[in-house]
Amino acid sequence: MLRRDGVSNCITLFVGLVCAGFPRPDLKLLAIALKEQEVQNPGGVCCRGMKSKERIRVGKELLEAKRIEEENERKRLLALRKAEKEEEKRAREKIRQKLEEDKAERRRKLGLPPEEPAAAKPCTPVAEEKKSMLPVRPAAKVDQMRECLRSVKQSHKDDDAKVKRAFQTLLTYIGNVARNPGEEKFRKIRLTNQTFQDRVGSLRGGIEFLELCGFEKTEGGEFLFLPRDKADMALLNSAGSELNSAINNPFFGVL
């Protein structure tokens, strides 16, 4: 009876410690202690004849203690992974908000109106939606603009400063027109200007980008000119967004 009480007390204590979150006792040490009790106990009673069902019960209790320990470890790891995912989610949301703030600031500097949230756009009937989608030309031009900027990047991939200067110069041209569409001086560029040639004209894709924005070669190819009636604010807005993306995205044009 003393033997059975001692074993039960050891197992109960072990399970209690594991459930309470204490460090796991060494199962090997517990097994050794139980074996020593089999050989000798305070009552001097030899336990070699302990019934097989008692041994089975002790084994089951040890297995249960081990199972509880493993379950607690699994829960701890799950909680840790959940905390890591939450932290990653918060970091991504913070980055997204920062990008939105930077985008709004760039639009403000370009003199462009704030971009309306997609969710705030009113639902339009199917007929009106089809009508508004007829002029698909700007979307196609935006893709071509991106290809022009990618050509500039890939043609001078070893000179990041030159590429960035070209993008910033193009952004200045586009921004000036968007803010002052009535000013002819902002809609006319002399192709033979040395500064223009150094920064944009000599780079593959630079002049093509401006032509996609509406600029046309005039006076025998001496100037790039954007007629007032061809100054498409939506297209210029898209061009500014593409340039800002190319400037701020370190991976733009890498692939």
Image (spheres, rainbow, N blue to C red):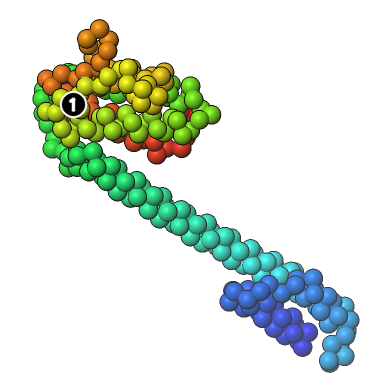
> In terms of depth relative to the viewer, which is nearer, 191 or 212?
191
Name the residue nearer the viewer: 223 or 156.
223
x and y, in percent, of residue 92 in the image? 41, 50
The outermost residue toward the bottom is 43
Does 48 appear above or below 180? below
Q: Is residue 43 above or below residue 33?
A: below
Counting from the top left corner in percent of width and height, residue 160 is at 48, 33
Q: Quadrant of the N terminus?
A: bottom right
Secondary-structure class at tag 1:
helix
Whether residue 45 sits left or right of residue 78 in the image: it is right
Badge 1 crowding class, 10 Å Cα cut-off, few under 14, some 14 to 19, many 20 or more, is few
Horizontal relation, residue 179 to residue 36: left or right: left
The answer to whether 183 appears left or right of 189 in the picture is left
Residue at 31% from the left image edge and 46% from the top image edge: 102
Residue 243: name its quadrant.
top left
Rendering coords of residue 242 (x, y %): 33, 31
Q: Which residue is mark 1?
A: 185
The one nearer the camera, 209 or 55, is 209
- Residue at x 29%, y 48% (from the top left corner): 101
Above or below, comparing residue 195 to residue 111 in the picture: above
Which residue is found at the position 25% from the left and 21% from the top?
A: 189
On screen, residue 160 versus residue 211, left or right, reads right
Examine the rendering and report whether any part of residue 52 can be seen.
no
Q: Residue furthest top?
A: 220
Q: Quadrant of residue 146?
A: top left
Picture quarter containing residue 122? top left
Residue in the image at 12% along x and 31% along y: 124
User: Which amino acid type is shown beneath numbered disc 1?
Assistant: Lys
Residue 77, horizontal then vertical, whole percent? 57, 60
Depth check: give the residue in front, 90 or 36.
90
Q: Is any atom of residue 44 visible in this view?
A: yes
